[in-house]
């Protein structure tokens, strides 16, 4: 075939997977068309200005946002609260629950999830194997990464936990985590996690209640300079320390570049550890704060929703963050905590998007059921809600709308 064959001018953009999103509202008030192709945003133009493609999604009435991510899930225990008897950790059961939970979180808008998975004890690496299988089966729908959470890492029992941690990373757990507070030697535990992470070049994501200033300060000293970075959470205990002490801890965390992932929906630990991290204090000190969902209908939170918009709503209503700032804790800050590239609704950025019925970010955080989720340039989930008012007499008399969408 001669290479001089004339090319149609549109060939450069005639990607069979291309998708045109039309009439979407942006947070700056513009109404635009957005063309997606090759998993990225190819172009953003005023409504009607972009060449129509075969695939088109009308986003009239929707606000288009960078998709949120879920930086703190528990795929191995999710959706166990309503099942009587002991939780099954059989590989097929964990895989089924982790898949179902990830799809639920995806339907809310999270196109990437970080899932903490306990390893060791009688179940060994079974739950990790199950979550990694769920990850493979979900490829193309949602990106899932797994955090290995060993029980003990110090003393005699710790040797076994350490061996299993190395094995979990070799299996595909991309992040090293754990609960230092639960080990007899919390500092030794954290040191070991940081060493293993440095050896394998993995990020670190640790659970801590954050109520021990000396322990937090030591952790910050050890974490400083570790690349890729260190995430801790949910840190509700930090809010119960005297303010000056909490502020000093926050300064150390900021200096070390540690990110705090708070859990406004109630956390993933025991009832006495519920509460919110001191988000305003942390932000004032320069700590990067993201928000995650934590427990999703397991024993820690049988009513957990795993909805990033709910986490942002709670942060806004409880701490007074502006709606846009609250959304950033589940979107740009959470993406950054997971080491993911930035998303903006601009040409060249990854096509990871969430369209929510509404006009403004405050409205969609207040309440919004109808959502369209885009991952790698494709619509991967769609939820629609129709509201009907049934008192027709009142509707006629007052000329009220009888239908709506939310
Ligand atoms: Zn957790």
Image: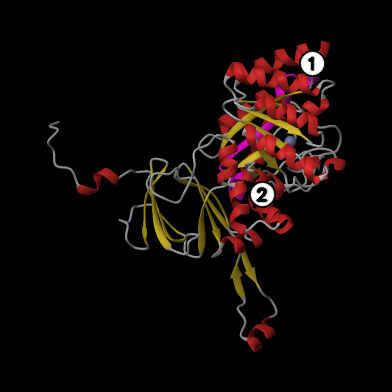
Left or right: 160 in relation to 131: right
The image quadrant where one finds the C terminus is bottom right
Decide: is 322 above or below 222. Answer: below
Give the alpha-carbon distance from disc 2 to disc 1, as whole Å.
Answer: 36 Å
Q: Mark 1 = which residue?
A: 154
Which residue shows up at 72% across the image and 44% down it?
263
The image quadrant where one finds the N terminus is top left
Decide: is 160 above or below 193. Answer: above
Q: Where is residue 12 in the image (x, y as percent from the top left)?
A: 26, 43
Residue 47, image quadrant: bottom left
Q: Which region is colored magenta?
A: 106-126
Decide: is 160 above or below 319. Answer: above
User: Is residue 140 at least partly visible in the picture?
Assistant: yes
10 Å crowding of disc 1: few (<14), some (14-19), many (20+): many
Q: Where is residue 299 in the image (x, y as percent from the top left)?
A: 82, 39
Which residue shows up at 35% across the image and 52% down it?
54
Q: Mark 2 = which residue?
A: 307
Q: Position of residue 10 (x, y in %)?
A: 24, 48
User: Is residue 385 at least partly visible in the picture?
Assistant: no
Quick check: which quadrant has ligand 1?
top right
Mark 2 and mark 1 lie on one chain; the one further toward the N terminus is 1
Labelled disc at residue 183: none
Which residue shows up at 66% across the image and 46% down it?
283
């Amino acid at each position: 075939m001669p290479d001089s064959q004339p090319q149609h001018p549109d060939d450069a953009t005639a990607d069979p997977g291309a998708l045109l999103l039309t009439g979407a509202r942006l947070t700056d008030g513009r109404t635009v068309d957005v063309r997606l192709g090759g998993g990225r945003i190819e172009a953003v133009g005023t409504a009607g200005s972009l060449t129509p493609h075969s695939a088109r999604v009308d986003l009239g009435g929707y606000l288009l946002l960078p998709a949120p991510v879920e930086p703190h899930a528990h795929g191995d225990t999710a959706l166990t609260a309503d099942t009587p008897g002991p939780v099954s950790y059989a590989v097929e059961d964990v895989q089924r629950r982790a898949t179902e939970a990830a799809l639920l979180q995806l339907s809310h808008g999270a196109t990437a999830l970080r899932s903490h998975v306990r390893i060791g004890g009688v179940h060994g690496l079974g739950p990790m194997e199950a979550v990694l299988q769920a990850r493979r089966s979900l490829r193309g729908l949602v990106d899932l990464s797994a955090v290995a959470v060993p029980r003990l890492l110090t003393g005699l029992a710790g040797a076994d936990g350490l061996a299993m941690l190395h094995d979990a990373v070799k299996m595909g757990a991309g992040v090293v985590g754990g609960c230092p507070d639960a080990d007899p030697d919390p500092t030794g535990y954290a040191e070991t996690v940081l060493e293993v992470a440095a050896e394998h070049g993995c990020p670190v994501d640790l659970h801590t209640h954050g109520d021990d200033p000396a322990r937090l300060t030591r952790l910050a000293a050890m974490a400083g300079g570790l690349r890729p970075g260190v995430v801790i959470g949910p840190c509700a205990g930090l809010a119960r320390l005297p303010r000056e002490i909490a502020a000093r801890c926050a300064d150390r965390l900021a200096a070390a570049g540690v990110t705090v992932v708070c859990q406004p929906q109630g956390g993933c630990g025991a009832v006495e550890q519920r509460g919110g991290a001191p988000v305003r204090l942390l932000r004032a000190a320069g700590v990067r704060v993201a928000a995650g969902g934590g427990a999703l209908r397991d024993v820690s939170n049988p009513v957990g929703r795993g909805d990033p918009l709910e986490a942002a709503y709670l942060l806004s209503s409880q701490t007074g963050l502006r709606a846009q700032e609250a959304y950033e804790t589940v979107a740009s800050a959470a993406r950054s905590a997971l080491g993911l590239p930035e998303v903006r609704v601009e040409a060249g950025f990854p096509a990871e998007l969430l369209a929510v019925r509404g006009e403004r970010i405050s409205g969609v955080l207040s309440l919004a059921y109808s959502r369209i989720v885009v991952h790698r340039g494709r619509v991967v989930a769609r939820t629609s809600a129709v509201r009907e008012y049934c008192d027709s007499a009142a509707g006629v008399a007052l000329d009220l709308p009888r239908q709506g969408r939310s």
